[in-house]
Amino acid sequence: MGTFNYTNAPNQLAAQLSQAPLNSVLEAVTGSILKTQEKLNQESLSIAQRMAGAEPSDQVLFGRHKYSLLELGFVPEFYQLGETQVNLKMALQLAHNNQGVQIYSQLLNERNFLSGHFTPDAASEIRATLVPTNAPGLFEKRVAQMLEDVTEQAFDGIKAQLIAHTAQNVSLNDLAKAGISDALPENLSRYQARLNQLHPDELPHIPALQQLVTRTNAFAVIADYVAKRDLRPLVMEALFAAGVNGAVERNLAHYRARLAEMTSVSDDAALQTAVEQANSLAQIISFLQLRTVNAITADLLTSAGVTDLDNNNMSSYLNALGQIALASLDALTLSGIQAVIDAANNNVNG
């Protein structure tokens, strides 16, 4: 703004116009554009962090597993302002006062349009194009490192609770942060109990923790079959997942039969024992089918779970076992063999 002197009109008009606040206007507009780009970057980073699933609440359930959106193949979208066109239009006004005539300048706004001196076509405008762009390669590496750091930190926290003998405080959230999948609320107490039984050296890394959860889930399914006295759904995959050793497909019916005789299965050791007993029972049945009864030993009977054996009565046991009808051998169970042994003991002991 300045005083206008008519005697030096051309020069003074040029000077007054040069004092119009164009620099500050352009700085403000440019600054707004740069801040907009910064805001876009920050928002994209925030979305990318949530997509990384660092917090369990940011993960999604897909099937039976929880994944981050990045693990499912989604990628964060980044944008940059492409070509930006700024078209500024200003209104200049002459005003008389006691100092003469002054020039006032301002960007066109709605007040100018309402006054009737301008049309909307004369308005200032900014045109900007949002252009999608790939996430920086370094950013992707940082996200991967962040996920690894989060899971390792969560795993270290769980291991610290093992050392402190406070694994009963491990939560599903702790397991999820450690990258563990398939952790089920109904099995949480089982996870905690198993962790409390471990020495810290028995949990060296995250895969070992995942194996513990997977085995616990499989064991819980089998234990439920036993509790319901219905072993028909039992499959080999469940036994393998529970960490059972020595299970073979041809003996699956014997595993079902042996577990069906039990009212409960307390732990992994009990399940493993049941499978080993069923394997020995299958071998005994095989000898009986081949009519090679003398191949049956006291040790084999013991490994099948038979009790109250007397080595002095072995010939009586073998004789009694050899009398079992071939047609009924496939359905022979531990309790059936035990009944034969008990009857032989009674006959010998009078």
Image (spheres, rainbow, N blue to C red):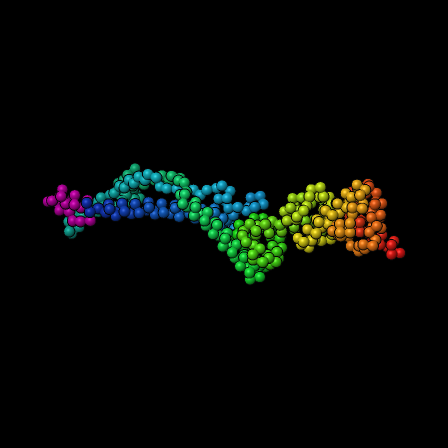
Magenta stretch bounds: 1-17
Closer to us: 166 or 246: 246
User: Residue 85 sits in which quadrant?
Assistant: top left
**Picture quarter with the C terminus:** bottom right
Q: Extreme bottom residue here? A: 164
Where residue 331 sits in the image (x, y, percent)? 78, 44
* Residue 280 in view of the camera: yes
User: Residue 107 sits in which quadrant?
Assistant: top left
Q: How many marks?
A: 0
Closer to us: 128 or 216: 216
Which residue shows up at 52% across the image and 57% down it?
A: 157
* Residue 331 in view of the camera: no
Closer to us: 92 or 294: 294
Residue 323 on the magenta segment: no
148 sits left or right of 217 in the view: left
Which residue shows up at 43% across the image and 42% down it?
A: 77
Where residue 49 sits in the image (x, y, percent)? 45, 48
Where residue 116 sits in the image (x, y, percent)? 28, 41
Which residue shows up at 50% across the image and 44% down it?
A: 71
What secondary structure prevails in the magenta region?
helix
Q: Extreme right residue here? A: 350
Residue 4 on the magenta segment: yes
Q: Extreme top residue here? A: 121
122 sits left or right of 201 in the view: left
Which residue shows up at 71% across the image and 41% down it?
A: 250
Where residue 152 sits in the image (x, y, percent)? 50, 53
301 sits left or right of 217 in the view: right
